[in-house]
Image (spheres, rainbow, N blue to C red):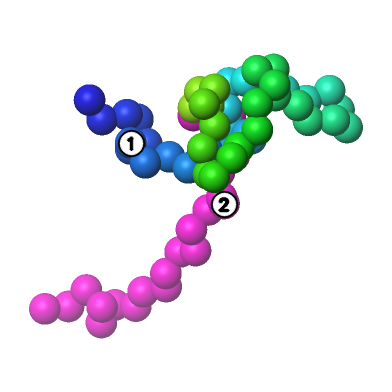
Amino acid sequence: MKKLFGNNIVPDCGYCDNYNTDGEQNFCEAKKEIKNGKCRKFLYNPTLRTPKGEAEMMEFNKEDFEI
């Protein structure tokens, strides 16, 4: 089964269900750390991702649409 954003999501505490923050301090509710690029308690939550920003719009002119 293919997941929402693919099967190869690199663990990042910022978008894990176990990630929590209390203003200044960030912590893992499962008390785990990412080791060798893996976390045994990593639970991906796509709603925690922040968009990277809007893509730049390309500028076109009339000649670009002529055949």
Question: Mark 1 Cα within 10 Å, few/some/many (few <14, many 20+)?
Answer: few
Question: Mark 2 Cα within 10 Å, few/some/many (few <14, many 20+)?
Answer: few
For mark 1, give the secondary structure. Answer: loop
Q: Is residue 26 visible?
A: yes
Question: How far separated are the C-alphas under marks 1 and 2?
Answer: 23 Å
Name the residue beneath numbered marker 1.
Answer: 7
Q: Residue 23 in the image: x percent, y percent?
A: 86, 28
Q: Residue 42 in the image: x percent, y percent?
A: 53, 26
Q: Quadrant of residue 24?
A: top right
**What label does residue 33 carry, if any?**
none
Q: Quadrant of residue 1?
A: top left
Query: Residue at position x 42%, y 73% from top?
Result: 59
Which of 5/52 is in front? 5
- In the displayed orientation, state which residue is furthest to the left: 67
**What label does residue 53 carry, if any?**
2
- In the displayed orientation, state which residue is furthest to the top: 29
The residue segment tinted magenta is: 45-67
- In the displayed orientation, state which residue is furthest to the front: 36
Q: Is residue 18 above or below residue 34?
A: above
Q: Which amino acid type is marked by label 1?
A: Asn
For mark 2, give the secondary structure. Answer: loop
- In the displayed orientation, state which residue is furthest to the bottom: 63
Query: Residue at position x 35%, y 30% from top?
Result: 4
Q: Is residue 49 visible?
A: no
Q: Is residue 28 above or below residue 33?
A: above
Residue 2 placement, left or right of 50: left
Query: Residue at position x 53%, y 44% from top?
Result: 37
Magenta-drawn stretch, dominant element (helix, strand or loop): loop
Q: Earlier in the sequence, mark 1 or mark 2?
A: 1
Q: Quadrant of residue 65?
A: bottom left
**In magenta segment, residue 59:** yes
Q: Which amino acid type is marked by label 2?
A: Gly
